[in-house]
Image (spheres, rainbow, N blue to C red):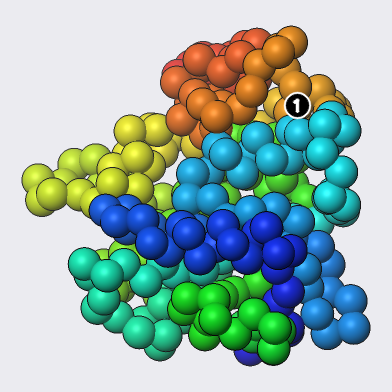
Amino acid sequence: METVEFEMHPNDYISCKEIHDLEGFDAPIFALAGPVKGGRVKSISQFNYCRETTCEVIRQEVRGITRRGLKTSKLYVVMNRRMYRSNPKGGAAVFKNQVLAAQEMVNAVERHYGWALTRVYKTKPVKEQQEVPNREQFYYIVASKRWMKAPAMLSLFLLIFRIGRFNSKYRFKGKIKSINDLFKILDRSGSRAPIPDDLATFGDLGPKRVRLLLDNYQDIFGNRGMKKLYYPAKSHRLFTEGIQSACDLESVDRILNTKLSKALTRDKKK
């Protein structure tokens, strides 16, 4: 795995240290970034643990509310594992396997639809930011622009990377060779055992609806620009606008609701 230097804007650096001090939240955190230049990648947002907050960051960039240099030719994300004081188990090797398991999951989707494959890089902090918590557990992710085309797609992408952290329990890594393998592993709706939060979220979405959303990606999203997709209703922010609202047919994006509903109707007639 290649390594790149990671530099955070001073405000992003402060927010990263602060988010590590929060108790009671067991999930990776994400920040948007730019492309690699001279072996170094820079953050263009603060770290967030909420998928839809990251969608809101993109909305503000594509609408010109903020101007931190978002590139839309590809999705550039940095992912970090929080060091929770109450649950310090698991080290760098464990988290690396979790990240690679998630990469296998998204790669299965990408191979099925012929998209460019997501790549993952190890990072090291610049020398001025050595005090960042968990500095050996930052990963730089470069993915197809299709994953950032719309809030629902970005939300799904980050959800899958969050699900990767359950690799230690369910042993996903090495078992996902196709998109069918992916959905078989992630659909635990029939399980009687307690299901961790993000896996439960995936089950609540209705795996068939996720699959239909992906199958009909071009019809639902392909012909619309990001400005419209990230601003589907006037004065609406995206803190609740992700894959969950899309699969529930409750998105403020009425075109998405209509087209996914029609896809569900066609599927029922098969």
How crowded pointer 1 is (Cα within 10 Å; few <14, some 14-19, many 20+) is rated as: some
In which quadrant of the rendered image does the N terminus lie? bottom right
Residue 201, position in %: x, y?
35, 40
Residue 190, position in %: x, y?
18, 42
Q: Nearer the viewer, residue 236 or 244?
A: 236
Question: In the rendered image, which quarter is residue 125 located in?
Answer: bottom right
Residue 33, position in %: x, y?
74, 61
Residue 70, position in %: x, y?
83, 50
The residue that appears at 73% across and 74% down in the rendered structure is 7
Q: Nearer the viewer, residue 232 or 204?
A: 232
For this view, does 50 lie left or right of residue 129?
A: left
How many numbered discs? 1
| Residue 32 seen in render | no
Question: In the rendered image, which quarter is residue 87 located in?
Answer: bottom left
The residue that appears at 56% across and 18% down in the rendered structure is 251
Figure check: 49 above or below 190 = below
Secondary element at tag 1: helix
Q: Nearer the viewer, residue 5 or 229?
A: 5
Identified by mark 1, the residue type is Leu
The residue that appears at 41% across and 77% down in the rendered structure is 95
For this view, does 194 lie left or right of residue 50?
A: left
For this view, does 135 lie left or right of residue 235?
A: left
Figure check: 233 above or below 248 = above
Figure check: 45 above or below 95 = above
| Residue 139 seen in render | yes
Residue where numbered disc 1 is placed: 229
